[in-house]
Image: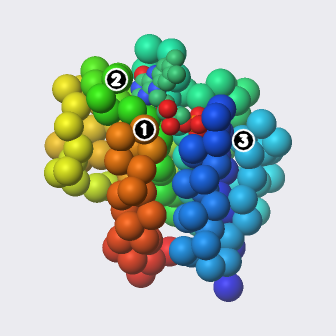
Amino acid sequence: MKKTIIIYGSTSGNTATAAETLKAKLGDADVKEVSTASADDLANYDNIFLGTSTWGDGELQDDWYGFIPTVKAANLTGKTVALFGVGDQMSYSDTYVNGMGEIYEAVKNTGAKIIGATSTDGYSFNESKAVVDGKFVGLALDYDNQSDLSDDRIASWVDAIKAEL
Ligand SMILES: Cc1cc2nc3c(=O)[nH]c(=O)nc-3n(C[C@H](O)[C@H](O)[C@H](O)COP(=O)(O)O)c2cc1C
C-alpha cells in the first residue's frame, strides 16, 4: 500500500489545522511538523504533501528554512508531491501564499510528480508566486478571510487528486 505523509510549518496554528483536516480527509496519512522532518521522511513515503503559511513579505513559514535544502537535495523520482499554502489574500494581496511558490521551486527539480494545481477562481488578490501558468501550484487556503471555505476546499481537492495518489 502506498504511504502518505503531510509535512507542514505553522506559526499560529492555521496550517496545522489544514494539515489535520487534510489527514482526516485522506484517511491514512502521517503528519509531521517540518521542524522535526528529516530526509527519511521524504525517502520513506510515496505521497508527500507539503504545506506552509506565508510570513514577512511573502516568505516561507520560519520552520521551513531548515528543511528546504533537504528537499532540494532529495531525489524524489517516482514519488508524488502535492502542495498547500495558507495566507491572507486581503492584507497581503501582492504576496498571497508566496510560500507555497517557494516550496514549488524547491521541489521542481527533484524528479517528483507534482499534482494538485487549482483554479484561482473564488480568490481576490493582486499577485502570488504560487501562481504558475494561471493556476495555483497547489491548494490555496485563507483562514483570515475565507475560513468557512477551507474544509470544503480541502475535501474537493482530495477528491480531485485521489486517483493520482
Ligand atoms: C506579519 C505577517 C505577515 C504575513 N505575510 C503574509 C504574506 O506575505 N502573504 C500571505 O499570503 N499571508 C501573509 N500573512 C498571513 C498568514 O500567512 C496567515 O495569517 C496564516 O493563516 C498563518 O498561518 P499559520 O498560523 O499556519 O502560520 C502574514 C501574517 C502576518 C501576521
Q: Find residue 58 and report its image quarter.
A: top left
Q: How is the image coloured?
A: rainbow
Q: CA distance from mark 2 to mark 3?
A: 26 Å
Q: Is mark 1 within 8 Å of ligand 1?
A: yes
Labels 3, 1: front one: 1
Question: x, y (%) of residue 143?
Answer: 45, 44
Density class for disc 2 (Cα within 10 Å; few <14, some 14-19, many ≥20) is: few
Circle 3 — which element? helix
Kindly identify the amino acid type of the residue bearing the numbered disc 2. Ser
Foreground residue among 83 and 97: 97
Answer whether labels 2 and 3 touch (C-beta < 8 Å): no
Foreground residue among 109 and 148: 148
Q: Is mark 2 within 8 Å of ligand 1?
A: yes
Dot placed on the residue nearer the N-terminal end, 2 or 3: 3
Q: Find residue 19 and report its image quarter.
A: bottom right
Kindly identify the amino acid type of the residue bearing the numbered disc 3. Val
Answer whether labels 2 and 1 touch (C-beta < 8 Å): yes
Kindly identify the amino acid type of the residue bearing the numbered disc 1. Asp
Specify whether residue 69 is in view. no
Specify whether residue 118 is in view. yes
Location of mark 1 (residue):
144
Location of mark 2 (residue):
91
Location of mark 3 (residue):
34
Question: x, y (%) of residue 43?
Answer: 73, 57
Question: x, y (%) of residue 27?
Answer: 62, 79
What residue sits 68% from the left and 70% below the top? Answer: 29
Q: CA distance from mark 3 to mark 1?
A: 22 Å
Q: Is mark 3 within 8 Å of ligand 1?
A: no
